[in-house]
Amino acid sequence: MSTVESNVRPEYDDEIQKIADYVLDYSIDNDSPNSADAWHTARHCLMDTLGCGLLALRFPECTKHLGPNSPDQITPNGARVPGTAYRLDPIKAAFDIGCMVRWLDYNDTWLAAEWGHPSDNVGGILAVADYISQCNISRGHVPLTMRHVLEAMIMAHEIQGVLALENSFNRVGLDHVFLVKLASTAVVAKLYNLPRERMMAAISQSLVDGQALRTYRHAPNAGSRKSWAAGDATSRAVRLVDITLRGEMGIPGALTAPQWGFYDVLFSHTNKDLALKHESERQFRFQREFGSYVMENILFKLSFPAEFHAQTACEAAVILHPRIEDRIDDIDKIVLTTHESAIRIISKEGELSNPADRDHCLQYMVAVALLTGDLMAEDYEDDYHEQHHLLIDPLRRKMEVVEDPSYSTDYHDPSKRSIANAIQVFFNDGSSTDKVAIEYPIGHKRRRAAGIPILEAKFRANLATRFVETRCDEIIALCNDQSRLEQKPVNEFMDLFVTN
C-alpha cells in the first residue's frame, strides 16, 4: 500500500468546465424559438425582484442590515442599493440587494429535487454591473447595458435551476444558497470579463468555500438568517471573484478530490434512501443541458409573500374564506392535502417564535388566509401575531395535513411541475365545504397570461412605497419597453432607484 499521495495536478473537474463553457460560449438568442420568451421573462423577473426588495425596506429588521460596514466609508463609483442613498463597494452592495430581495420571501422560486430562488443572484449581478459601469465611464469606456444584466440573470437562473433538478442538497442538510453562490460566481466572473481558466478558478473557490446548513430554516431553529442567507451567498460570490481577479489560484479537483473534495465531504450521503449503490450517486446529475429553460419556466410569487409550497394552499384558503368566515367557531377540523416537499419543509406544530418561523408554517399561512381572505407580509410580524393569535392558533390545532401521492409525483414530473394543495373544512354538525384543490399557482408558467398583469400591478404598488408617482411612471415605462430597457446603461438604470 502506497504511503505517499500523487501530486499530479488534475484538469478542472468536468462540472466546473461545463459551467464555465456555458457562461462563456452559450448564446441565448440561438435557443430559438424560446429565446424571446427567456428575455421577456427575465425583464419581468427583474421588475418583480426589485419590487420585492423595495417593499422589504418598510421592515426595520431588514434595513438594520443595510449600509456601509464603516459609517464614514466613502466609495468612489460605489454600487447603488435600490430605494436608498447608499453607494457601497460591490461586495457589500451585493449583500444589501440580496438581503432586500429575499427578506419577505416574495421573489421568484424554483422547485425540483432542490428548492431555491434564482433571483437571489440579482444582488451580485446588479451591484457588480453598476460598479463596472461607473468605473468604465470614469475611465472613458462604455458602460454595461441592462441587456448584460438580463443575460446574467438568465444564465444564473439556468445554473442554479438545472443543478436543482435532480440534486437534492437539502437531503444532506445543505442550504440551497450554495447554488446562489455557485451561479453568482460564474456570471459575475463573466461581467468582469474573466478568461476561461480564471472563471474556472473562481468557480472552484465557490465549491470549496464551505456551505451553509439548513438549520435556520427548520423547526425548532427557524430564524431570520434565512432572510439574509442568499444576500450573504451572492455577496460571497462577488468576493471570490475579486480574489480571483487578484491572481488567486484555483482548485481544479474541488469536486472530485478523494476524501477532501466536495463530493466526498459534503455530498456522500445524498440519495441515502437508495443506499448509495453506485459512485455516480455521489455526483451532480444533469437532467438537461444548460440553455434558458429555467428562466422560461420560473415561478413567480404574485399573490402572497409565502413559501412557495404553500401558494396554492393560500389561494384555496382565500376561496374558502367567504364560505366559513361566519362559522369559525363551528369548525371541527380542516384537512390540508398536500405534497411531500411541503410536509417536509413547512408543516409544523407548536409555538411560532418569530416572523421567519411563521412564514415557513403551512398551517399559519392557511389560518390567516381563511380568517381574513388575504395574506400579507405584515401578518407574520410579532405585533400581528400577538393581536390575533387567539384566532389563529386554535385553527392551526384543528388542521390535519395529509399527503396525496399523486401531488408528490406531479411535483417532480418535468412536464407538469405542479405545486398542488387542497383544503376542506368540516363543521361540528357534520357538514363540510367542498374540497377546494388548486394544482398550479397564479405564478406558474401555465398561468402566465393571467399572472403578468398581477406581476405588473405588484411592481407598481411596490415602487409606490419608495418613490413619487412621476418616478414610478418613468420606471414602469422603461421596464415595459423590452428594447429600450436592454439598451439602457446600467448606471442610468440604477440612477432611477436612488433616494435622498
Image (tube, helix red, strand yellow):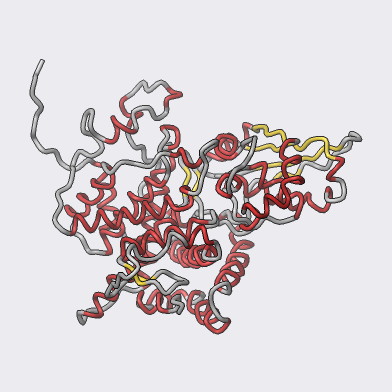
Could you tell whether 252 is left or right of 398 in the image?
A: left
Could you tell whether 310 is left or right of 69 in the image?
A: right
In the foreground, 355 or 361: 355
Quadrant occupied by the N terminus = top left
> Which percent across, then down, holds residue 39?
43, 65
Identify the residue at image location x=54%, y=53%: 105
Could you tell whether 239 is left or right of 439 in the image?
A: left
The extreme right residue here reads 429
> Which percent across, then down, holds residue 77?
28, 75
In the foreground, 2 or 349: 349
Quadrant occupied by the C terminus = bottom left
Quadrant in which residue 3 is drawn = top left
Identify the residue at image location x=40%, y=55%: 231
> Which percent across, then down, holds residue 161?
42, 48
Could you tell whether 197 is left or right of 318 in the image?
A: left
Quadrant in which residue 157 is drawn = bottom left
In the foreground, 192 or 231: 231
Identify the residue at image location x=56%, y=34%: 344
Residue 422 in sight from this viewpoint: yes
